[in-house]
Image: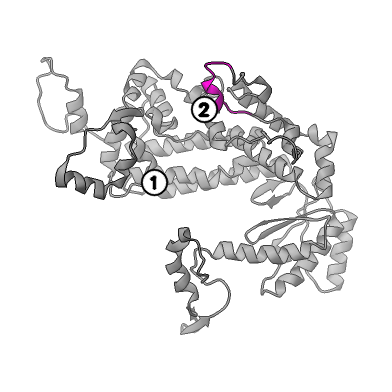
């Protein structure tokens, strides 16, 4: 273990010592049921949380060395998933060299689990001659040929589907089905707040990544369907049945979607995420490709055919949508010398396409082509009543607006800390109090919704009561007058809070 390991990683040292200060003992169960212990002294140890990273670093070195001999082939890696892009003859030779190099580190390239996709022939009923010749050579050598994907097929590169529209749509439908399965599995959780967090993770890990490199025209319909599935799953777990359609239902859906600082539950609508994610990641990809030394890519980026492709048309459409929602181009910025331009620093600026693809002169002025953050772009779309009418705060009813008004982030003055031993104890136990300026704090009543639950427990009935009160909808799980109180309703006392508390 290097003694110069940065202090910030000190928390990892016990794990590093546990895995690498001596041989790991692996328990092997024999076919006859017997137990055998094997001492593992080399390589990444099983159970090491850093194993995937260390494996990727080692694999990158091996693959990079091999691919240096094939400058006309591009290799894309995601852990142990490798994709080769280039001419058919070149990638087959590169795959053969890569297979031999991997054997030196006890890894194998499995042709049976691989596939060859040639876009030009995706509609052809039979493979091209170049593939037939390759398959014949493999057969004569007693080797397994990489399968051709066949008519209407495609491949996945870094987890994204590449192929005709039907292949991409089937991929998205499988993603939606996987989310439906996950939602059904987590529906049995007893704690409402835990269910709420896990339900949100179903979309974060399963669909959001896919939204980033597929055309919004392909993903937004699926995103809209998944948004509906998430809302239905929330209703079913919280109340056991859907709340009756009407203004209260519409208000609750809006409050469920919008950010916590605005008094809502903060579940991002994926329909709004899709164009923001596509624009952001495509911009980053174009910038990386524009700075690469891969000649075929440079030729593609400079071609008029690429600029007129459906992919780039979708990119321009996403950019125009963001401009409609309030983003600006640099030439449209107000003069910083003019007074009352405080909004300039908060303005989202979209760099021009040519500035993204072509790197600026290193000797010139500091580049301003900063690609905006995806989260900021998503919030921009959500704040647009034109493009997010179903999730916009402006469509709340008067009752809904009054309810969430008290749940928004507010500046709250703090009472003076007590002096003497009691005050000293507070300062010692809560040093973060020293960071609060001028005795005030920004308080968000629903902020705990976006934090780990910790010791907070919300059994289903308690969560249903909380969600009903916060979202302003009836609670079907709670019978009327559950407390058994017989209050005189003719008096001037406001019984609403009493009823909510009892339920």
Q: Give the percent coordinates (x, y) of residue 218.
A: 65, 36
Image quadrant where residue 175 sits: top right
Q: Viewer-proximal residue, 88 or 411?
A: 411
- Left/right of residue 375 with respect to residue 466 in the rendered view: right
Residue placed at 63% from the left, 23% from the top? 328
Residue 271 seen by the camera: no
Magenta residues?
Answer: 338-349
Label 1 sits on a secondary structure element that is loop
Residue 486, quarter of picture: top left
Does residue 406 sit above or below 458 in this rendering? above
Query: According to the image, label 2 marks what residue?
Result: 382
The one nearer the camera, 14 or 226, is 14
* Left-right relation of 29 to 495: right
Marks 1/2 in contact by CB < 8 Å: the verdict is: no
Disc on res. 72: none
Identify the residue at horizontal 51%, vertical 24% (top origin): 383
Relative image position of residue 48 (x, y in whole percent): 50, 67
Queried whether the magenta region covers residue 342, the answer comes back as: yes
User: How far apart in space, not on screen, are marks 1 and 2 (Cα)?
Assistant: 28 Å
User: Can residue 64 be seen by looking at this rendering?
Assistant: yes
Residue 217 percent across, percent down from the top left: 65, 32
Location of mark 1 (residue): 187
Q: Please tell me which residue lies in front, 209 or 227.
A: 209
Would residue 43 appear left or right of 289 to someone viewing this image? left
User: Badge 1: few (under 14), some or many (20 or more) residues near its Cα, within 10 Å?
Assistant: some
Disc number lying in front (1 or 2): 2
Q: Residue 265's image quarter?
A: top left
Q: Earlier in the sequence, mark 1 or mark 2?
A: 1
Magenta stretch: includes residue 4: no
């Amino acid at each position: 273990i290097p003694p110069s390991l940065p202090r910030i990683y000190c928390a990892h040292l016990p794990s590093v010592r546990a895995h690498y200060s001596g041989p790991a003992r692996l328990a092997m169960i024999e076919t006859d049921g017997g137990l055998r212990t094997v001492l593992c002294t080399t390589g990444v140890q099983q159970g090491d949380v850093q194993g995937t990273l260390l494996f990727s670093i080692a694999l990158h070195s091996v693959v990079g060395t091999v691919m240096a001999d094939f400058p006309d082939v591009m290799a894309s890696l995601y852990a142990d998933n490798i994709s080769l892009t280039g001419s058919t003859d070149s990638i087959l030779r590169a795959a053969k060299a890569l297979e031999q190099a991997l054997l030196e580190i006890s890894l194998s390239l499995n042709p049976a689990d691989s596939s060859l996709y040639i876009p030009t022939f995706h509609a052809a009923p039979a493979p091209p001659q170049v593939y037939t010749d390759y398959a014949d050579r493999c057969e004569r050598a007693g080797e397994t040929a990489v399968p051709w994907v066949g008519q209407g097929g495609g491949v996945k590169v870094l987890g994204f589907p590449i192929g005709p529209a039907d292949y991409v749509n089937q991929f998205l439908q499988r993603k939606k089905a996987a989310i439906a399965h996950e939602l059904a599995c987590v529906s049995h959780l007893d704690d409402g707040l835990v269910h709420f967090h896990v339900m949100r993770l179903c979309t974060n890990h399963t669909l959001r990544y896919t939204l980033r490199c597929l055309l919004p025209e392909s993903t937004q319909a699926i995103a809209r369907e998944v948004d509906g599935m998430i809302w239905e799953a929330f209703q079913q777990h919280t109340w056991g049945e859907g709340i009756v359609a009407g203004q209260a239902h519409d208000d609750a859906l809006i409050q469920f979607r919008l950010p916590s600082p605005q008094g809502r539950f903060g579940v991002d609508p994926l329909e709004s995420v899709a164009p923001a994610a596509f624009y952001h990641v495509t911009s980053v990809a174009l910038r990386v490709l524009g700075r690469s030394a891969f000649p075929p890519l440079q030729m593609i980026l400079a071609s008029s055919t690429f600029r007129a492709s459906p992919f780039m048309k979708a990119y321009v459409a996403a950019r125009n949508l963001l401009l409609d929602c309030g983003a600006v181009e640099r030439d449209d910025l107000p003069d910083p010398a003019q007074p009352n331009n405080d909004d300039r620093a908060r303005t989202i600026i979209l760099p021009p396409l040519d500035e993204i693809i072509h790197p600026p002169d290193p000797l010139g002025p500091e580049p301003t082509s900063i690609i905006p953050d995806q989260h900021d772009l998503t919030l921009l779309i959500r704040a647009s009543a034109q493009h997010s009418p179903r999730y916009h705060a402006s469509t709340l009813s008067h009752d809904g607006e009054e309810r969430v008004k008290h749940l928004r982030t507010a500046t709250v003055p703090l009472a003076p800390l007590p002096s003497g031993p009691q005050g000293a104890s507070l300062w010692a136990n809560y040093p973060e109090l020293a960071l609060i300026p001028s005795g005030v704090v920004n308080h968000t009543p629903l902020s705990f919704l976006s934090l780990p639950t910790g010791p907070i427990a919300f059994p289903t009935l308690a969560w249903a009561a909380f969600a009903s009160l916060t979202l302003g909808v009836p609670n079907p799980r709670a019978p009327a007058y559950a407390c058994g109180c017989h209050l005189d309703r003719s008096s001037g006392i406001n019984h609403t809070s009493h009823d909510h508390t009892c339920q």
